[in-house]
Image: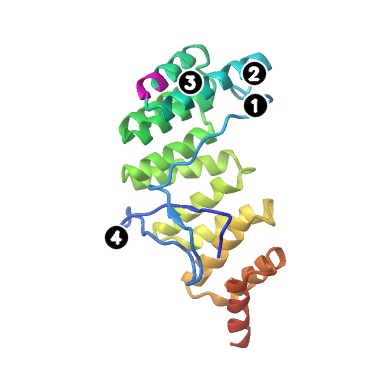
Amino acid sequence: MINKLIFFFICLTTAAFADDFKCQHYKFDEANNWLCAHLERGIFHALSPDVLMSDKTPIDNDTIKKIEIVFSQAELSYEQGNYAKVEQDYRQLLKEQSHYAPVWIKLAQLYSDLNREHDALQTLHQALERIADNADIYYEMGLVQVRLRRFSKAVTSLAKAAVKAPENAHYSFVYAIALNSTQRPYKAIDILLQALRRHPDNMEILEALFSINQDINNHSEALVFAQKILIIEPDNDSIQRYVIKFKKN
């Protein structure tokens, strides 16, 4: 169904208890390239020069350039397998820019890549002590908590990310998938519908609404979202077949 997008889904191996995630891929037979959040670690890109270091303190262009140089050096060191140098570079940068969220997130992602998830989580907790209520930090924390199987805490973190950054459709999407994975599909649909009002053409949101409604056998609503998807992707053969099938019914 989707060749351009890879969804970050909140997963687990079995669904036995309320605090567990059910690993679902929200797809029909023809879909492909779908991954679970605990297996996929996103790459955090450096923000543009007009980014804020905090809610109140602007960051200047010279500082941005310096940070970008450190990021580039760290990426090169990572490619060379010099992980200690990467950690050193990030920690040195944090001494100077402790209120710049991307540095904390980069360091946490390094630890995750090295299978040091507890260090990643500790780093993100430290980040929130410096930068309160940062949506990007909450989002990254939620993904780490999923990998550590702290599912209820992960849902809370992802919820905070979605609430504090409503302009970021992906955060709302992942929060909704987390809710659905903890057997709360109707709450997930509610979150997605709110996001859809802000982002009416967002394919992640539309596809999730289609898939979750399909999962709960609410095919009348699934059909509505399938038709919206076709407006954006008229050549989507899988959606076309679904619409034809259920329009007949």
Extent of the magenta region = 82-86
Percent coordinates x, y for residue 38 in the rendering: 38, 47
Amino acid type of the residue that numbered disc 1 sits on in the rendered structure = Val
Residue 128 is at least partly visible in this image: no
Percent coordinates x, y for residue 15 in the rendering: 31, 61
> Residue 14 shows which numbered tag?
4
Amino acid type of the residue that numbered disc 3 sits on in the rendered structure = Arg
Cα distance in 3D space between marks 1 and 3: 17 Å
Q: Residue at x 40, y 27 (%)?
A: 80
Q: Quadrant of the C terminus?
A: bottom right
Q: Residue at x 47, y 44 (%)?
A: 158
- Compared to 98, does 186 lie above or below? below
Cα distance in 3D space between marks 3 and 4: 37 Å
Q: Depth check: 134 or 234 in front?
A: 234
Q: Earlier in the sequence, mark 1 or mark 4?
A: 4
Percent coordinates x, y for residue 1 in the rendering: 55, 65
Q: Earlier in the sequence, mark 1 or mark 3?
A: 1
Task: Say few, some or many: other residues with alpha carbon within 10 Å of mark 4 (under 14 / 14 to 19 / 20 or more).
Answer: few
- Color scheme of the displayed model: rainbow
Label count reads 4
Mark 4 secondary-structure assignment: loop
> Residue 201 shows which numbered tag?
none
Cα distance in 3D space between marks 2 and 3: 16 Å
Q: Earlier in the sequence, mark 4 or mark 2?
A: 4
